[in-house]
Amino acid sequence: MTQLFKTKCAWSKGANESASRVGQFCHDCLPRTFDCVDVDCVIFKRSTRMTRIMEEKLPGERLSTAQINILPLLAGLVELAVKGKKLPEGSGVFILWHATRNARIEEASDDDEVVIQRVPTNKYEMERMPTWRGKIGEIRAWLSGDFQQIDFSIEEAKDGR
């Protein structure tokens, strides 16, 4: 057994908290030679194969370096699957920003404002992501994996969105 597996590093939670125990272990206990992220939500509509990978952020939060490196890679994989007809158009990787710090999607009302950004396949394009601004009520079908046309426009990225 290698030294890596003999570690007594505990599964801990902290400022850089992961939703998964393995993610937290990788963050706390392994050498910093790789990026590791957990994804907040993957929506997969079985009947259509619509796939949306979602990262959720509150105002003032920033994407981590690991997210900036990995989310565009995931977007590229989804794009390849769309081009290969394995997934439908409308599939992708998205960041959902809440308009208020206290808002959480499970507590959202139809009138709560959100911003959704489509992650590009190139991390160097993350400063100008296609963006949609609106209310939760306008995109409930989209969030459930239905095909719903939402119009994204290009905006300069800014902290807190």
Image: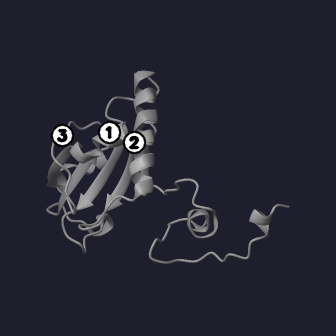
Label 3 with label 1: CB-CB less than 8 Å: no
Q: Secondary structure at mark 3?
A: loop
* Proximity of marks 2 and 1: CB atoms separated by less than 8 Å: yes
Seen from the viewer's position, the closer of residues 38 and 157 is 157
Q: Which mark is residue 84?
A: none
Kindly identify which residue carries mark 2.
72
Could one spot residue 82 in this view of the protein? yes
In the drawing, does residue 18 fall left or right of residue 118? Answer: right
Residue 110: percent from the left, percent from the top?
18, 60
* Residue sticking out furthest to the top: 84
Upstream in sequence: badge 2 or badge 1: 2
Say whether disc 3 or disc 1 marks the residue closer to the N-terminus.
1
Name the amino acid, label 2: Pro
Give the residue type that dot 3 points to. Phe
Q: Residue at x 73, y 76 (%)?
A: 8
Residue shown at 45% from the left, 28% from the top: 81
Q: Nearer the viewer, mark 2 or mark 3?
A: 2
Q: Mark 1 = which residue?
A: 120
> For mark 2, does the 10 Å Cα neighbourhood hold few (<14), some (14 to 19), or many (20 or more) residues?
many
Inspect the image, locate mark 1, and give the three-letter code of the amino acid beneath it.
Pro
Residue holding disc 3 = 152
Callout 1: SS: loop
Q: Residue at x 20, y 51 (%)?
A: 157
Helix, strand or loop for disc 2: helix
Which residue is the extreme one toward the right?
1
Q: CA distance from mark 2 to mark 1?
A: 6 Å
Q: Tell me if mark 1 has few (under 14), some (14-19) or many (20+) residues whose alpha carbon lies within 10 angstroms of its own.
A: many
Q: Earlier in the sequence, mark 2 or mark 3?
A: 2
The answer for how far apart the CA atoms under marks 2 and 3 are is: 17 Å
Of badges 3 and 1, the one in the foreground is 1
Q: Is residue 11 left or right of residue 1?
A: left
Q: Residue 156 appears at what percent x and percent y?
A: 16, 48
